[in-house]
Image (cartoon, helix red, strand yellow):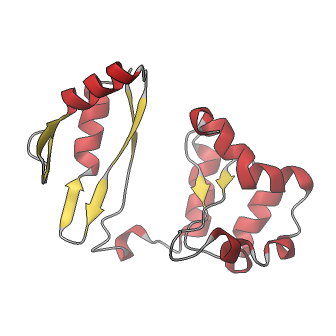
C-alpha cells in the first residue's frame, strides 16, 4: 500500500528516502523504480513512481506497469500503435514478453528486420513461458545476424549497461 510516497510492507513503511539511503550505502548512483500492481490493486502506483522520479530525477528512472486486475485497457491491438510510438520517441522500446516467437505479429517482425531493429527486446514472461519455449521457432522469423543479435541481447545491454 502507498501512502504519500511511502511503501507499506509487512515489515512496516519504507519511505523513498530509505531507498535512496540504501542506494548511497551500496554506492549506487542511479536506480530504476517500477510501479507494482498485485491482485488487490496498486502496491506502488505509476503516479507514485512518477512523483518519486520528479522529486529525484538525478537518482531515479521510472518504469510504468499495468494494473493486472484490468489488463484489457492496457492492450490496444497494440502492434501498430507501439511501432509508431517506438519510432517517434527515442526512449520508447518494445519487448516481446508473453509471446512465443512464431506468434509475433507480422508488423513487429518487419519492424525488427528494418528500422526497428534497435527498438525491440526479447522477453519470455518466465515462468509462464520459458525462454526456450519463447524461442523454439525463432528461426522462422528470418532475421539477419545484426537484427537477431540486437533482439536477443544487444538492445538490452545498450539500454541497461549495468545489467550486462
Of the pair 162 and 142, the residue shown nearer to us: 162
Of the pair 31 and 64, the residue shown nearer to us: 31
| x 53%, y 69%: residue | 126
**Residue 156 in the image, given as x and y percentages of width and height:** 65, 45
> Which quadrant of the view contains residue 16?
top left
Q: Is residue 14 left or right of residue 52?
A: left
Screen quadrant of the C terminus? top right
**Residue 101 in the image, given as x and y percentages of width and height:** 71, 74
**Residue 76 in the image, given as x and y percentages of width and height:** 47, 71
The correct choice, above or below, for 103 with respect to 26 in the image is: below
Of the pair 118 and 156, the residue shown nearer to us: 156
Residue 7 visible in this rendered orientation of the protein: yes
Q: Is residue 72 left or right of residue 116?
A: left
> Which quadrant of the view contains residue 65?
bottom left
Q: Is residue 143 left or right of residue 31?
A: right
Q: Is residue 125 left or right of residue 140?
A: left
**Residue 131 in the image, given as x and y percentages of width and height:** 65, 68
The correct choice, above or below, for 123 with respect to 149 in the image is: below
Amino acid at each position: 500500500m502507498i501512502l504519500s510516497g511511502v511503501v507499506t510492507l509487512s515489515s512496516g513503511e519504507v519511505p523513498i528516502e530509505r531507498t535512496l539511503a540504501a542506494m548511497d550505502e551500496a554506492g549506487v548512483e542511479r536506480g530504476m523504480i517500477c510501479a507494482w500492481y498485485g491482485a488487490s490493486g496498486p502496491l506502488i502506483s505509476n503516479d507514485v513512481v512518477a512523483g518519486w522520479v520528479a522529486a529525484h530525477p538525478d537518482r531515479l528512472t521510472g518504469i510504468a506497469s499495468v494494473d493486472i486486475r484490468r489488463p484489457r485497457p492496457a492492450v490496444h491491438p497494440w502492434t501498430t500503435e507501439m511501432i509508431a510510438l517506438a519510432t517517434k520517441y527515442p526512449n520508447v522500446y518494445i519487448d516481446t514478453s508473453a509471446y512465443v516467437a512464431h506468434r509475433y505479429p507480422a508488423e513487429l517482425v518487419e519492424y525488427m528486420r528494418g528500422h526497428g531493429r534497435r527498438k525491440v527486446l526479447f522477453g519470455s514472461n518466465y515462468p509462464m513461458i520459458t525462454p526456450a519455449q519463447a524461442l523454439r521457432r525463432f528461426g522462422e522469423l528470418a532475421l539477419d545476424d545484426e537484427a537477431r543479435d540486437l533482439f536477443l541481447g544487444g538492445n538490452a545491454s545498450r539500454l541497461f549497461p549495468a545489467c550486462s
